[in-house]
Amino acid sequence: MKKQFSFLIILFFALASQAQIDVKAIDKYIEKARKDWNVPGMAVAIVKDGEVVMSKGYGVKEIGEKDKVDENTQFAIASNSKAFVASCIAKLVEEEKLSWKDKVRDYLPYFSLYGDEYVSSEITVEDLLCHRVGLGTFSGDVIWYKSNKTPEEIIKRAAYVPEAYSFRDGYGYTNLMFITAGEVIKTVTGKPWEDYVKDNFLNPLGMENTVISVKDLNDNVATPHKPTLDNGTIPGVWASWDNSSAAGGIISSSTDMAKWMMMNLNGGAWDGSEYINKEQQNLLWTPHNNNKLSERSKEALPGRHFVGYGLGWGLMDYHGNMAVSHGGGYDGMYSRVMMIPDINLGIVVLTNTMEGISTPLTYYIVNQYLKKDMRDWSAEYLKRARSSNGHKDDVDERIARRVSGTKTSIDPSLLEGIYNDPMFGDIAVKKDGDSFRISFADAPALDATLEHWHYDTYQIKWDEEHAWFDFGTVSFELDNNLDVEGIEFDVPNGDIFFDELHPKKKD
């Protein structure tokens, strides 16, 4: 009798706590934050105890237009796609079509990393999904970004990406290894990974507004936006991530992502169907690579004691609860998913600009349910974001150091030619009047005009607007006899590292 009475008390307080959640207040907070951050449009879904508490659009699909975002509007979820890849692998393991400990070379014999034969032969399928292979964060992304290379060609080029730390002895967030995982799925199933995830997850879950290519966008779609260096916002265009779809190519809506979260929160099963069994689901949410949690991070986010990465998911503790989350960054769109399995809560925030609003909103909502740390998360993060100029300071420094009145040290015609970097491919430089044209053989979307900056350095005037970078220069390197030896890039940004390329002039 006492046990039954205790249970009823616990149930009463649990229901009372749930009843105290003011969804209307959360709704108002989200809209105010959107305006404060100058985000044109966004969509938010909250799921709790297997029910959709909220799935709603805010703002407009494109700045200056009237078409409003709704719960079915499509946004790029970018790296939140990685959890789908991991679930596909888990499904194949469950079906005994591969093993987590299988060597990648069992499926992709051409796979190789940084000239280390031992590492290349020992990397497992599991290693691909937890950022511990030895590559630096975002290193090598320049290989696939806006390129025409196939996934196989990208993986072969990855052999030239430099080692950043010892194998399984660090953390380096790598898109390249998820592209590799996508090709493993293709080899095992005989079909592109995109078809496998559609057949086994997207279609059965009824994710009707979810696609994996910009070619398949419907009419209800948000426009990407880029914050400018002067704190403005400009609309952009959808960039194709088809060749890197396993790293970040899924495009979805808040309603569809609510279904995905509810399935995950329910141990891999939903609406009478099992998608992956609980054993595999548990493995995805088991830390495989632990990160250092700095004292500054602990102060900014009290309630955390560890942070790590599972398989396709970020993991941490938060006020005594396990938290499962991931972010996504696409050309002109940011997103975040956060789930607290202990209380069966999931949140997704999708935005059509590159502002960091999604993280504080997820924490704000989580803390409303936990009744912990109920501060103004959006205001704090916004103040921090506005106090940082991103790469604007780097650009301003380079502009300030320009030396006017100089000219190139050799006959400009000698700068023409084909330059090759083994990690990237051929890059052509050709005279064009008083300037030059630089052309990327496998990535024509990166083509640009080169205008003299100072000495043997030329400014890159991109043919099209790019989300991650803007200002950049190319320096022509000479040997002791003043022969042109190669070119070096300087394109300040935090994601696409042109300075990893060191193209040498072909004879």
Image: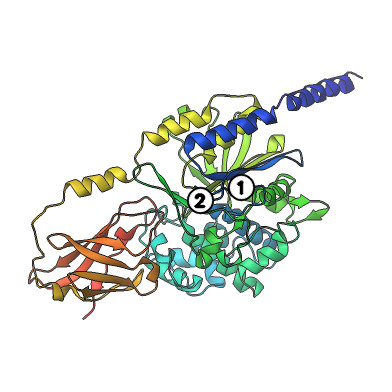
Nearer to us: label 1 or label 2 = 1
Residue 136 horizontal side relative to residue 281, left or right: left
Question: Which one is earlier in the sequence, the residue at label 1 or at label 2?
Answer: 1
* Label number found at residue 168: none
Residue furthest out toward the right? 1
Residue 169 horizontal side relative to residue 478, left or right: right
The residue labelled by disc 1 is 69
Q: Amino acid at mark 2?
A: Met
Residue count near mark 1 (Cα–Cα under 10 Å), binned few <14, some 14–19, many ≥20: many
Task: Tell me the quadrant of the picture where the C terminus can be found.
Answer: bottom left
The residue labelled by disc 2 is 333
Residue 327 at least partly seen: no
Q: Is residue 439 above or below residue 141?
A: below
Task: Tell me the quadrant of the picture where the N terminus can be found.
Answer: top right
Q: Amino acid at mark 1?
A: Val
Residue pictured at 55% horizontal, 45% vertical? 41
Q: Is residue 34 above or below residue 195?
A: above
Name which quarter of the figure residue 294 lies in: top left
Q: Secondary structure at mark 1?
A: loop
Decide which of 138, 66 is in the foreground and name it. 66
Residue 476 percent location from the top left of the image: 18, 66
Q: How is the image coloured?
A: rainbow
Residue 489 percent location from the top left of the image: 26, 60
Q: Is residue 240 above or below residue 17?
A: below
Residue 128 percent location from the top left of the image: 53, 59
Q: How many marks?
A: 2
Residue furthest out toward the bottom? 507
Q: CA distance from mark 1 to mark 2?
A: 14 Å
Residue pictured at 14% horizontal, 75% vertical? 414
Residue pictured at 45% horizontal, 72% vertical? 148
